[in-house]
Image (cartoon, grey):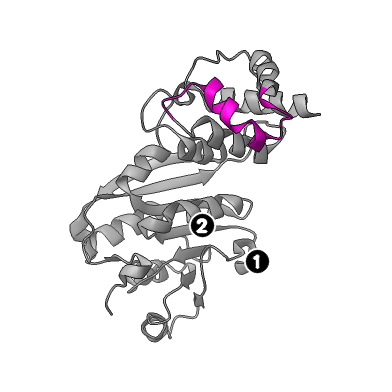
Amino acid sequence: MRAKRSLGQNFLVGSHYPRRIVDSVAPQAGETIIEIGPGQGALTGLLVETGARVIAIELDPDLIPHLSQSFSDCEHFRLVEADALRVDYCELIAPDASARVVANLPYYISTPIMQRLIEHRRCLSEMTLMLQREVVERITASPGGKEYGFLSVLAQFYCEVEKLFDVPPGAFRPAPKVYSSALRLRARARTAAVKDEVLLIELTKVLFAQRRKTILNNLRAGWGKLGLADASGIFGPLSASGLDPRRRAETLSIEEIARLADAITVSRA
């Protein structure tokens, strides 16, 4: 089974890092674990051994026969041939109300899949994801650093984030050119109060559109995406939220971005 470059496949090999990932998840017998991209089954076999109910989602039809044969005797294993970006995860795990996710994600699609999983946080309590190390550093970054940006705000608004450990290129076949990292996301029981979450996300995109510009300049360029009547509509919310328009987005905390989003929502009413 050769990895397909078109699908961004880099299969985990050996036992050390797959074992570390599964040990960090610590699946319990009977709980539901969703695995995205089982590949050749390095993680799948270890997950099945725990007695958890494993639902594996695989897009590549050429891997389906191998996976089906390898785990044909496992009553608590289910293989689904599907696109992880289109799956309704809450429907998939029924009748269970909650599940956890384990995934070794292709680099090129890791961010959209993470966003999709966050959208289903009502039924996905925890996600342990293998991502490019650079992406994990952005997700876990704090305000004030160059890594802090849209991904940081998106992930940390909805989840508690924790980098677990790095994984070298040699743990994969074919070996990627960069390091990977294991990341844990735990869905927050309650997110910070905000009047319009869709606006919050759009505002974050606007604020970080050009990192070297001030928040005022980015808001002037993106006012239309925020539902404002014209560019002058940004001044009232900036004043109401108490933010210095000369600041850059990377200095703003999530709470400050949420406060500005609420001020924009009020101004549009």
> Which residue has dot 2 on it?
100
> Which residue has dot 1 on it?
91
Residue 229 visible from this viewpoint: yes
Q: Quadrant of residue 201?
A: top right
- Count of residue discs: 2
Image vertical order of residue 41 relative to residue 33, above or below: below
Image vertical order of residue 51 relative to residue 255, above or below: below
Please name whichever residue, 82 or 191, is drawn nearer the observer in this view of the structure.
82
What range is drawn magenta here? Answer: 211-231
Image vertical order of residue 13 relative to residue 243, above or below: below
Quadrant in which the N terminus appears: bottom left
Q: Quadrant of residue 241?
A: top right
- At x 67%, y 31%, the residue is 193
Quadrant in which the C terminus appears: top right
Q: Position of residue 42 (x, y in %)?
A: 31, 69
Label 1 residue SS: helix
Relative to residue 173, is residue 269 drawn left or right? right
